[in-house]
Image: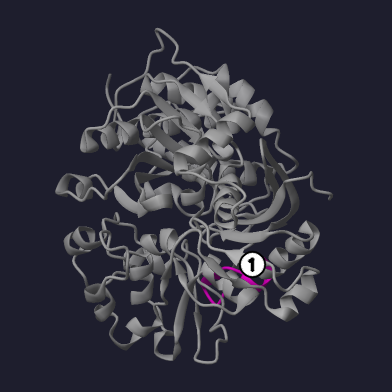
Amino acid sequence: MQSAPGTRRYAAVDLGASSGRVVVAEIGPGTLDLREVHRFANVPVRAGGTLYWDILRIYRGVLDGLRAAGPVDGIGIDSWAVDYGLLDERGALLGNPVHYRDARTEHANSDVPFEELYARTGIARQPFNTIHQLAAEPRLATAATLLLIPDLIAYWLTGEIGAELTNASTTQLLDARTREWDPALAARLGPAAAILPPIRRPGEVIGPLLPEVAAEIGMPAATRVIAVGSHDTASAVAAVPAADGRFAYISCGTWSLVGVELDQPMISEEGRRANFTNEAGIDGTVRYLRNVTGLWPLQECVRVWSSAVPADPAAPAPPGASTTGAPGPGGPVDLAGLLEQAAREEPFRSVVDADDPIFHAPGDMPARIADVCRRSGQPVPDTRARTVRCVVDSLALAHRAAIGEALRLTGRAVDTVHIVGGGSRNALLCRLTADACGLPVVAGPVEATSIGNVLVQARADGAVSGTLTDLRALIRRGRPLERYEPRPGAVIPEVGRFGRSAG
């Protein structure tokens, strides 16, 4: 692809829980153009009773994508948080990384009281946080280095070892104030504390490609890999197209990460009880947010409806498998059509707690939703459209609850809610979120994570300059956005944190 004069090209490697992709951006004066050049499936593998990431298949997809990208001026890598690979003293990988949805995270727990963990790290309680996974990790005795997923890919590309800040902050091993590994928490790991690599910041150059990697993907060996906000939410929030600080954000995909942006961590007993987390963002910002189960239940519903393959209902199923114990109807599912039908259904006929652990694991999501509604005395969704409406209504209410608590805890006032990521394409969800919050919703950009990734690269490379606010102004000028105003008279039920009220 021929670049326009004065533009530079950057590759964003964006690894999601179900797929990975490589996006090429052209950035120059008044230019911010993105093109996806490669997408590949990210399919977990269950072996010996453990759910693993197929990390070598992921790396193969990255290499294929970078080859398709052609020569670029920089490469940045982002992914989901908390999961890691372990290297031995020779730098060899000690087996596939374990998936955060593996059953071991249900029972793993560090020996540090949660009150102390939160006071030191500001990170909310999640059973899959890295510190808890390490408590169930049998390979620590032979490990020399721990690398989070983006850092592992960067290591294979460059040979350089490090831990990027935004992702490291999710491990619950980082001091929220110093933004370095917490020595007291690291000491609890004993000799394994030595496996934590040096922290690096977004915008730092990790290193050039290894010669053999450069030859394989057809790029110059001088091509640099640049640290970005390697936690995908950090990159996505960096691409929120806000004009000032009076905004709340929802980075909506498999998860909805709902919160506000702060200059300093806010660590309080109320925040701990509300399960709000302080994750590191770009340029010293703090993502004060709560994890809400996002579009995952809807994604699982679509997978089950499209499947015609029976499977063990007691086991998490791979994509494409039914978990009902009997073949489903199979065939493609028209989600856009279902959302249009759902928009015509009775609002808030049935709602569930999006964060109920019953919805966390892969499985027969439509049956679980029906069972929860039945047990709570609500109408059972008896069509696909009503099931979709239940999911979207429930998620809009969860968005409202999380934003309301974020504002109460921080004392902030906001006048806009920004929804970025895949969920910004869901017009029904955006409209219902605006109604539920009583605030305008600005939807987009869909590709926020890739945009945040490449803009941090471009600034480090000198192709753009300025503050985070300046980068966001580039996005407002160059990306299509949709605005949803709250509808006067929209009736929204009062729903508590764990279910539907009687009102």
Is residue 373 among what the camera can see? Answer: no
Q: Position of residue 502 (x, y in %)?
A: 27, 22
User: Hey, which quadrant is residue 133 in on the image?
Assistant: bottom left
Along the line of sight, which residue is nearer the eye, 287 or 290?
A: 287
Q: Position of residue 420 (x, y in %)?
A: 52, 37
Identify the residue at the far right of this view: 2
Q: Position of residue 212 (x, y in %)?
A: 74, 80
Q: Which residue is mark 1?
A: 224
Amino acid bearing label 1: Arg
Q: Please give left or right for residue 467 compared with residue 56 in the image.
A: left
Is residue 147 among what the camera can see? Answer: yes
Identify the residue at the far top of this view: 489
Magenta residue check for 55: yes
Magenta residue check for 383: no
Work out whether 373 lies above or below 346. Answer: below
User: Hey, which quadrant is residue 42 in on the image?
Assistant: bottom right
Rendered residue at 62%/46% (across/down): 304
Q: Position of residue 474 (x, y in %)?
A: 57, 36
Rendered residue at 46%/50% (across/down): 234
Work out whether 443 lies above or below 306. Answer: above
Rendered residue at 59%/72% (across/down): 207
Magenta segment boundaries in residue numbering: 47-58
Q: Quadrant of the C terminus?
A: top left
Number of disc labels: 1
Q: Residues within 10 Å of mark 1 (few under 14, many from 20)?
A: many
Work out whether 450 lies above or below 146. Answer: above
Q: Please give left or right for residue 349 compared with residue 483 in the image.
A: left
